[in-house]
Image (tube, helix red, strand yellow):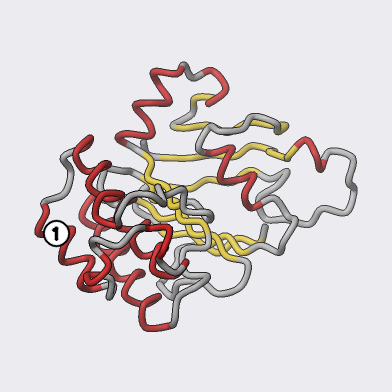
Amino acid sequence: MEKIQLRHTLPNVFQSRTDIVSDIWQRDVTFEKGKRYLVEANSGTGKSSLCSYIYGYRHDYQGEILFDGEDIRKYSVAQWTSIRQKHFALLWQELRMFPELTAWENVDIKNKLTGHQTKEQILTWFEMLGVADKLNAKMGRMSFGQRQRVALIRALCQPFDFLFVDEPISHLDDMNADIMGSIMTAEAEKQGAGIISTSIGKHIEMPYHQVFKL
């Protein structure tokens, strides 16, 4: 996938509003593979909706969303399955981990499906992000910041053209935020992929090609 395009897209819930000022809603916007983007938002401006629309979880919007020029509303279940397996990695704001499984099991269950990363690479990321001592800890007993770091590792256990991260460092200190940013950048560059990061305040510091105000 080379491009994600939004054409006059607007959540249905906003359709009666006349006060919307946004770089994304009701605009023509293009995200290109290989580039880095930051989407800054205030609460209630539709950030979570944007993530769900692009990932195909929700369709309650006006306008169009296109992947390489094709309207995603036309995609079959099989097409969406392929996109989520091969083209689009996502770190959800709420993480969507299995609390009853350990940190390692949460990552390994995905990597066994994709076979994308080596065990050595995964363990290196655990070390870099300061959660190597949590490999066998249940996710439900870890802090949110620890779970964010494990969730990033899981997100990287697949091939992708775009990495979408929704408020990835909301509960991290600056040091771990920088490490997360360097890991994301290195993996995206290895795959020639784009990064789309959202924030309602604190964001990963990296050289973004474009910053949007949602």
Which residue is labeled 1 in the image? 121
Q: Which residue lies at the image location 14% right of the left edge and 59% below the top edge?
A: 121
Which quadrant of the figure has residue 86?
A: top left
Q: Which residue lies at the image location 49% right of the left edge and 25% below the top edge?
A: 70
Q: Which residue lies at the image location 89% right of the left edge and 40% below the top edge?
A: 16
- Categorize mark 1 by other alpha carbons within 10 Å: few (<14), some (14-19), many (20+): few
Along the line of sight, the residue nearer the viewer: 36 or 125: 125
Q: What's the amino acid at mark 1?
A: Gln
Along the line of sight, the residue nearer the viewer: 193 or 135: 135
Residue 195: image location, x then y, percent: 40, 55
Q: Which residue lies at the image location 34% right of the left edge and 52% below the top edge?
A: 34
Quadrant of the snapshot with the N terminus: top left
Residue 113: image location, x then y, percent: 22, 35
Q: Is residue 125 left or right of residue 181?
A: left
Which quadrant of the figure has residue 59?
A: top right
Quadrant of the snapshot with the C terminus: bottom right
Q: Is residue 60 left or right of residue 102?
A: right
Residue 72: image location, x then y, percent: 53, 26
Residue 132: image location, x then y, percent: 22, 70
Along the line of sight, the residue nearer the viewer: 51 or 173: 173
